[in-house]
Each structure stands twice: as structure tokens, then as C-alpha cells.
Image: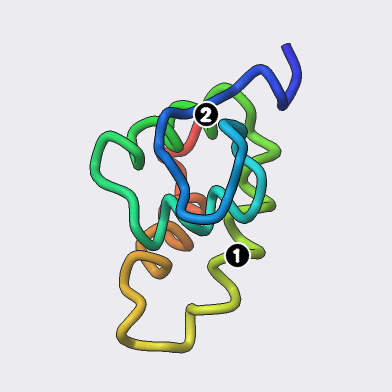
Amino acid sequence: MGFSDYTHSMSHRHLDTAYFIPPAIDDIICRGLMRDWLELREALRAYPPLRDDIIRICANYISDPTEQRYRFWWNYVQGPAVG
């Protein structure tokens, strides 16, 4: 099973895709609801290379104290609970 086999159901404001591409991941972290986060978590468990995309996306926001969602995901993907 490859990366493109993992899809999600969140509708993105500017994307015409159902795959976990970096802009979609950014949108899920920023605007997603718990069900969207759970889908991202399951995709991450099924396809661990998503971790690199999440880290890269979160790195853009990690120094901003108001962007707690990104800090959460930054810590989550680097912790032992992933997998």
C-alpha cells in the first residue's frame, strides 16, 4: 500500500484532493476537527513517512506561542506513542 492509498474526508478550503499532501496536512492541523485529527493519526500510523511532512509543516509555526495545534503535532510525531 502506498502513500496515495490513504485518504481523508475533510473538505479543504483551497484544495481539490482527498490525499494527505502537505497542504492538506497543514489545513487539517490548522482547521481540522477531532475526527480529522484522528484520520491524520491513523494515516500516520499506517504510513510513517507522513511524520516528515508533519514535522516540516509544524516547524514553520513552532516558535509562535499562539499556534498550539502545531506544537501538539510537533510533539506527538516525535514521541514514542507514534506507531
**Amino acid bearing label 1:** Ile
The answer to whether residue 83 is left or right of residue 34 is: right
The answer to whether residue 38 is left or right of residue 6 is: left
Name the residue nearer the viewer: 16 or 68.
16
Res 41 quadrant in image: top left
The image quadrant where one finds the N terminus is top right
30 in relation to 1, above or below: below
Neighbourhood count class around disc 1 (C-alpha, 10 Å): few under 14, some 14–19, many 20 upward? some
The answer to whether residue 72 is left or right of residue 17 is: left
Q: Position of residue 40 (x, y in %)?
A: 45, 37
Q: Residue at x 60, y 60 (%)?
A: 55
Q: Residue at x 66, y 64 (%)?
A: 56
The answer to whether residue 37 is left or right of residue 15 is: left
Q: Position of residue 42 (x, y in %)?
A: 44, 27
User: Tag 2's secondary structure?
Assistant: helix
User: Tag 1's secondary structure?
Assistant: helix
Res 3 quadrant in image: top right
Neighbourhood count class around disc 2 (C-alpha, 10 Å): few under 14, some 14–19, many 20 upward? many
Which residue does the numbered mark 1 point to in the structure image?
57
Q: Position of residue 64 (x, y in %)?
A: 42, 88
Which residue does the numbered mark 2 point to in the structure image?
43
Name the residue nearer the viewer: 57 or 11.
11
The count of marks equals 2
